Image (cartoon, rainbow, N blue to C red):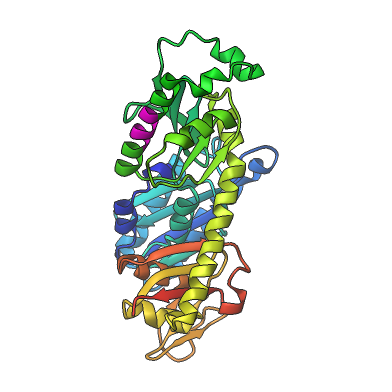
Amino acid sequence: MKLTDLTSATLADLRKVRPFPAVSLLMPTHRTEPDNAQDPIRLRNMVTEAKRRLESDPDVPRDARFDVAAQLDQALGEVDLVHSLDGLVILASPGEHEVWSLPREVPERVVFSDTYLTRNLVAARAQNEPYWVLALAIDHATLWGGTNDHVEQISLEGFPHKIDDLDWDVEHQERVGNFPSVYTDERTHQFMREIDTKLNALLGRHPRPFYLVGLPPVLAVLDEVRTNHHTEAGRVPKGGLTQGPPHALAAEVEPAREAYRAKQIGDLAQRIDAATGRRAMTSGLDEVWRAVLEGRVDTLVIEDGYRETVQVTENHLMPVPDGTPSNGFPVVDDIVDDIAERALDRGAQVYFVPDGELAERGHIAATLRF
């Protein structure tokens, strides 16, 4: 399945407890040769390893063993490694399976539990947040919807929109800039007011980060008449892109998207610092875990690669590096994934940041509601 199919409702369903074993198989994949030649072999080996574990695990009922093995075979047949992205996630449990191809690298793992590992899906969805692009010329505006790997023109809320009766040679003007009256004419300002109204409606009904693309004088006219309070995520001062092509438009917008993501990470750091000053922040695995269980977490921030195998005792989490229980308490293969799932279920916002961003806070931190 594509990441665009990963809605909030789908994520909530994937987080539900399932009959043991819920198998999560994660594997990094490659888009291009020669690296992608190894992917089919590695995938078959991982499925074989998962089946071996099904056979050897005494906690797996006999019927479930055959059922899940069959689900893994069906999933294997559905994987399209010819058009793979950066990560593959196969989820299988008695009676069901799903295959997800992600535009984001995942660690190579096979995990048995009573829930699926969903943190990589959550992180990929956040990283792949859909966005709008408004490509603007002096007489024409087009709307584009984008994700990490796809940009397409959209007809929505009155877009595309154009002036039909301009008698200027607009294309020539945009190339050489020798008709300044185009930018001061009342018809142009009325056109930009119409764009502003449509943009307000779009962002009110379909909120996403949005980017403005156009020549600086064109964007300046829009700025003169804008009444909305929606701040764009970025702008690209370049003309000639109202008709794309999609790959060229995406390439021009990408630096602005990178800057926006960097700003988001900076904003998260500021929120954590501000919460620290109010004594409304906690960090470290044990403290965050307890706050999540108590429903006190408002915003949870986790480093991308952070995971821990622990025993859940009555009072705290005990790291178990080799995954072997020492005192009879249950072992959780990835407590960080469990924390993220519980936080989402309790209405918290969950963000993933690059490794090292939270090194001084134990790789995980949260702002608190109370």
Q: Quadrant of residue 356?
A: bottom right
Which residue: 62% across, 43% down? 255
Which residue: 47% across, 44% down? 232
- Residue most toward the top? 167
- The span picked out in magenta is 193-199
Give left or right: position of 118 versus 104: left
Which residue: 56% across, 74% down? 363
- Residue 49 lies, in percent from the top left, at 52, 60
Frontmost residue, 196 versus 308: 196
Q: 301 above or below 221?
A: below
**Residue 333 appears anywhere in the view:** no
Q: 17 above or below 280?
A: above
- Assign the C terminus to one quadrant of the image: bottom left
- Assign the N terminus to one quadrant of the image: top left
- Residue 115 lies, in percent from the top left, at 36, 65
Q: 86 above or below 276?
A: above
Q: 93 above or below 60?
A: above
- Dominant SS in magenta: helix
Q: Is residue 98 magenta?
A: no
- Residue 357 lies, in percent from the top left, at 60, 68
- Residue 342 lies, in percent from the top left, at 35, 70
Frontmost residue, 255 versus 219: 219
